[in-house]
Amino acid sequence: MHNLLIVEDENIERRALRYIIEDKLSCINICGEAKSGLEAIKMAKKSAPDIILMDVEMPELNGLEAQKEIIKFLPNVHTIILSAYDDFAFTQSAIRIKVIDYLLKPIRPNDLIESINRSISLINAQNDRVINANQDDTLIKEAMKYIDENYNTYISLQSIAAHVHLNPQYFSRYFKSKIGINFINYLSSFRVIKAKDLLLNTDKNITEISQNVGYVDSSYFSKVFFKSVGIAPNQFRCQNKKQHF
């Protein structure tokens, strides 16, 4: 059983989150509900949750500010951010303070369940480590740094495994156990985030953006983007660019 803290200032949304979790995840115990960032910190100190669902826009302290304080005494907590805004810079800030996922409102039940299940998988994997903690942190940081610096070029499982000096098959299992998703899906998601930023902040065409995020074939890039976002790149640009600016 894993303890989960819900942090959401809207009563209806708190109730909806609780209902989904209690209906679909028997392995989760909801250990508390907080209505503000300050209350979230107090409750996290008291109940030491394994997982936190953290709304961003809240009174007193926002979700990211609360997360910064919480990881000082719960460094291994798995926090899932809930936000109405699809903001690239905001997402990057969340990653830096150990947020493991970022869900856009309105939250789709399947996305919420999938995200919590990834957290559970990661927690279970951390309880059964095969290398020590220092090596663990270094390898994951090196792998993510490699992706961050090379996402716009060809990256294979073999190339990143060689970079961190692991067998490709072992690295693949290891990466998934620590991050919660496999290497290919993580790389695709990272590239889609970068593509969204280019779609909203530049006038580059789809072919240029495709190449800028590591895809030689723009039609394949569009398929990956559609699978991740649910709409085509051009449609995403049209729907979001006016609002973004």
Image: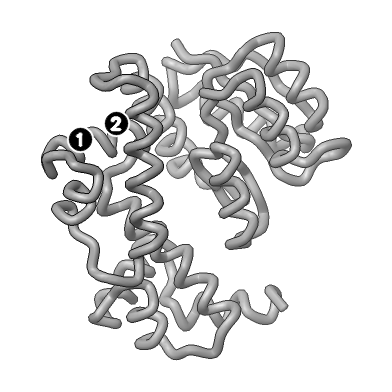
Residue position for label 2: 177
Q: Residue at x 34, y 32 (%)?
A: 178
**Could you tell me which quadrant the C terminus lies in?**
bottom right
Using the image, tell me which numbered label, if any, was put on residue 173.
1
Q: Eyeballing the image, is 90 above or below 32?
A: below
Q: Quadrant of residue 75?
A: top right
User: What is the crowding at mark 1: few (fewer than 14 residues within 10 Å), some, or many (at least 20)?
Assistant: few
Q: Residue 109: x and y, percent? A: 49, 40
Q: Residue 7: x and y, percent? A: 70, 30
Identify which amino acid the numbered label 1 is placed on: Arg
Q: Eyeballing the image, is 190 above or below 222?
A: above
User: Given contact means CB atoms under 8 Å apart, are the residues at marks 1 and 2 in contact?
Assistant: yes
Give the side of residue 181 with respect to residue 106, left or right.
left
Q: How is the image coloured?
A: one colour
Identify which amino acid the numbered label 2 is placed on: Ser
Q: Out of 151 and 199, give the one closest to the viewer.
A: 151
Q: Residue 211: x and y, percent? A: 33, 81
Q: Out of 45 and 3, give the one closest to the viewer.
A: 45
Give the side of residue 57 with respect to residue 4, left or right.
right
Q: Residue at x 29, y 71 (%)?
A: 153
